[in-house]
Image (cartoon, helix red, strand yellow):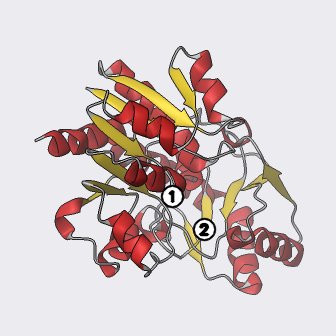
Amino acid sequence: MRILHVDMGREMRGGQWQVLHLLRGLKGRGHECELVTRAGSELGPVLRGEGYVVHEGGWMAVRRLTREFDVTHAHDARGHAMGAVAGAEKLVVARRVAFAVGKGWMSRWKYGRAKRFVAVSQYVAGVLREAGVEESRIRVVYDGVPLLEMRELGKVIVAPASPDPAKGTDLAMEAARMAGVQVKFSHDLEEDLPGAAAFVYLTREEGLGSGILLAMSAGVPVLASAVGGIPEIVEDGVTGLLTGNEPGMIAVRLTRLVEDRAMARTLGETGRVSVMERFTLERMVEATENVYREVLG
């Protein structure tokens, strides 16, 4: 198959990492992929450096190219809009976010254009159903992550660095202060996670949380907000700890994670097994490939 991917994200965040992993996996399965992205994106140069064809532009570029490909896969909201406006006939749309779909006529028109929606979790699939998207057009494909090196648990508590106020950086800082611990806010999780004492992922809304899966893949115990799609990947007390978004509660659970090293190791080991069984890159790529085949009949 020839697949045109559209991603307009500027930074390398969770969604862009998934696009990168997907294109690599599809190439390994014999498919041809190209990307349309905005000028100045971080994803474009990475893929170009690996030999992929990368186009910089907007809906006109998508309109010009989509007829040359079997499927057009939009990976974010702007890409979705561009694919719809460009008239992409075989349009697949990734939906990663947990917030409600708009109710205006433009939103209804846009959401009517996709042949399939790839929801990152059952929670997100529910958001689509509430917006009136038919069940027949929704497929759930969980993120896949690479299996990171597993080391002995160290002393550094890691959290993702994010300027997004919905991501709960303020909650992590306040809870850490109350627990009397320090948190490292990481811009490179693959580098900082192996050997960490714990991974703290606090957010006010979340489609899934691929950073959580990455920590689990490294055998690092996770403390995460019990919102959105997160409870689908973290079983409280089994593969990690879940918490409400109240600093005192977070501090209590964080202290428990830091002080009970035996429990932390067990959570980390079980979390890693869960990733190997359910959230591999191979499973994500194969499931997405199956969506394309459905669209092509």
| In the displayed structure image, the side of residue 104 where residue 172 appears, left or right | right
Residue under the point 35% across and 78% down: 131
Q: Quadrant of the N terminus?
A: top left
Which residue is nearer to you in this view: 103 or 63?
Answer: 63
Q: Residues within 10 Å of mark 2 (few under 14, many from 20)?
A: many
Please name the amino acid that badge 2 sits on: Ala
Which residue is nearer to you in this view: 95 or 71?
Answer: 71
Q: How many marks?
A: 2
User: Which quadrant holds residue 165?
Assistant: bottom right
Check disc 2 and report its element: helix, strand or loop: strand
Structural distance between the alpha carbons of marks 2 and 1: 26 Å
Q: Residues within 10 Å of mark 1 (few under 14, many from 20)?
A: some
Indicate whether 222 appears above or below 213.
Answer: below
Which residue is nearer to you in this view: 50 or 64?
Answer: 64
Q: Is residue 142 visible?
A: no
Mark 2 or mark 1: which comes first in sequence? 1
Residue under the point 51% across and 48% down: 269
Which residue is nearer to you in this view: 87 or 275?
Answer: 87
Residue under the point 50% across and 19% down: 52
| In the displayed structure image, the side of residue 56 where residue 87 appears, left or right | left
In percent of width and height, residue 185 lies at 81, 54
In percent of width and height, residue 274 lies at 40, 50
Q: Residue furthest left?
A: 297
| Label ID, residue 224 | 2
In percent of width and height, residue 236 lies at 49, 71
Check disc 1 and report its element: helix, strand or loop: helix
| Label ID, residue 77 | 1
| In the displayed structure image, the side of residue 229 where residue 116 appears, left or right | left
Residue under the point 76% across and 85% down: 248
Indicate whether 286 appears above or below 142.
Answer: above
In percent of width and height, residue 12 lies at 66, 42
Please name the amino acid that badge 1 sits on: Ala
